[in-house]
Image: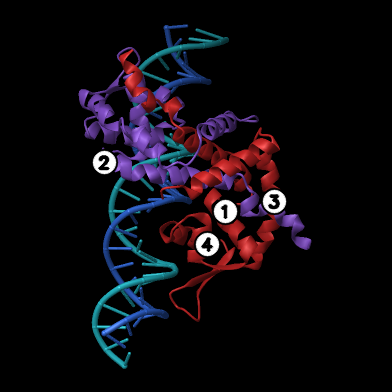
Chain colours: A red, B purple, C blue, D cyan
Amino acid sequence: MMEKKYEALKLSNQMCFPLYAASKEIVRRYKPVLDEIGLTYTQYITMMVLWEHESISVKDMGSLLYLDSGTLTPVLKKLEQKGFIKRQRDTGDERVLIVTVTDEGMALRDKALEVPAKIACTVDLSVEEAKLLCGILQKLINGCCS
Amino acid sequence: MMEKKYEALKLSNQMCFPLYAASKEIVRRYKPVLDEIGLTYTQYITMMVLWEHESISVKDMGSLLYLDSGTLTPVLKKLEQKGFIKRQRDTGDERVLIVTVTDEGMALRDKALEVPAKIACTVDLSVEEAKLLCGILQKLINGCCS
DNA sequence: TCAAATTCGATTGTGTGCAATTTAATCTTG
DNA sequence: CAAGATTAAATTGCACACAATCGAATTTGA
C-alpha cells in the first residue's frame, strides 16, 4: 500500500485527538451537575480557586487556571453579577485587580460539595488509572520544548 | 482542620482539570505548526477525516469528531471557501450533505505530513506512556453511565 | 396513503479561549 | 526626577463548542 506514507495522519494514530475528545466529554458530563448550582465549567474551576484562596489577583488566578485576562475578565464579571465574588483594585498597586469571594460565594461551596462525587461515578477508571493519567497529563502540561 | 470536608473541591484533586489543561496545551502547540499550512486545529482534524474518507456526510463526520452540525457547518463552509473541500447534497437523500475533498485538499495532505512529527517532538512522553494515555482516554470517552 | 414522527443540516444565542492591542499604573535608569 | 520600559487588566476580533430551535426531506404506521 502506497498509503503507508500517510499513516501518521490518521485520526486514530494521533494522541492529540483522544485528549481533545476526552476533555470535551468530561466537561459535557459536568454540565447537568453544574446546572444545578448555576455554574458553567469555567465558572466552576474559577470558584474552586477562590474557595481555596478567598482572595487572589487576576494574574495569579490566570497562572493557576492557565487562562489569560481575555478569558477571565468576562467570567469574573459574570460571577460578580451573580453575587459570588467581588472585584476591586489593589490599593497598593492600582494595576492589580483583587478578586474576593463573597459570603454567597462561600455558601455555594457547600452546594458544590457533591459535585466531585457525582462526576467520579460517571468515570469508570480505577484509582491507579486515574493517578497514572494525572501523572502523564502533568508531564504533558509542563512540556519539554516549550 | 475543619477543611477536610472540602478536600475534594481542591483543583489539584480533580482529574478533570489536568485533562482540560493538557488538552488546551496540546492545541496551543499545534497552532504555530498548523499556521504554516493555513489551518486551525478544528479545520485540521476535519481535514484528517477527509484525507481518510475522501467523501463523507456531515453526520458521519460529526460522529467521528464528536462534533455537531452547529460546530461543523461553519468550519466546513470555511474549508470550502479555502478550496479544500466541496459540499453537495446527497442526490438520494436531500437531507444529507456530502463533503468531498478537492484536489487542492488532497495536495494539502502532503504539506501536513510533517505535522505529527513536529508535534511529537514537543511531547516528552515515552511510547509506552503515550499508549497508556490513549487507552485510558479511550475508556473515559466511552464512559460508563453515559 | 397520508398524517405524525424522525432525521439531517442550518441557524441562533451563549460562553469560552486566545492572540493582539490598548490603557493605566508602576518600575527602572540614566 | 523624568522618559522609556514593563506590567496588569480590559478590550477587540476571530474561531470554536454546544444547546435549542427551525425547516425541509424522509420514514413510519394506523
Q: Specify few, some or many for label 4: CA neighbours under 10 Å numbering under 14, 14-19, or 20 or more.
A: many
Distance from the alpha carbon under mark 1 to that under mark 4: 10 Å
Chain letter, disc 4 residue: A
Q: Earlier in the sequence, mark 1 or mark 4?
A: 1
Q: Position of residue C24 (x, y in %)?
A: 36, 77
Residue placed most toward the observer, A101 or B34: B34
For marks 2 and 3 on the same chain, the one whose residue lies earlier in the sequence: 3
Q: Nearer the viewer, mark 1 or mark 4?
A: 4
Q: Label 2's element? A: loop
In the picture of the structure, the residue carrying the numbered disc 3 is B8
Task: Note whether A24 is above or below D26 in the view shown.
Answer: below
Q: CA distance from mark 2 to mark 3?
A: 43 Å
Question: Picture quarter containing residue A55?
Answer: bottom right
- The image quadrant where one finds the N terminus of chain B is bottom right
Residue drawn at the location 47% of the way across and 37% of the way down: A20
Are the residues under badges 1 and 4 in a single subunit? Answer: yes
Q: Are marks 2 and 4 in contact (CB under 8 Å)?
A: no
A127, above or below B95, in the image: below
Q: Residues within 10 Å of mark 1 (few under 14, many from 20)?
A: many
Residue placed at 30% from the left, 14% from the top? B91
Tell me whether circle 1 and circle 3 mark residues in contact (CB < 8 Å). no
- Residue labelled with disc 1: A45
Q: Is residue B118 above or below residue A89?
A: above
**Circle 2 residue:** B36
Q: What residue does disc 4 label?
A: A61
Mark 3, secondary structure of its residue = helix
Find out whether the residues at labels 1 and 2 contact each other: C-beta distance under 8 Å.
no
A11 to the left or right of B138:
left
What residue is drawn where x is 59% and y is 59%?
A49
Do the residues marked 1 and 2 share a common chain?
Answer: no
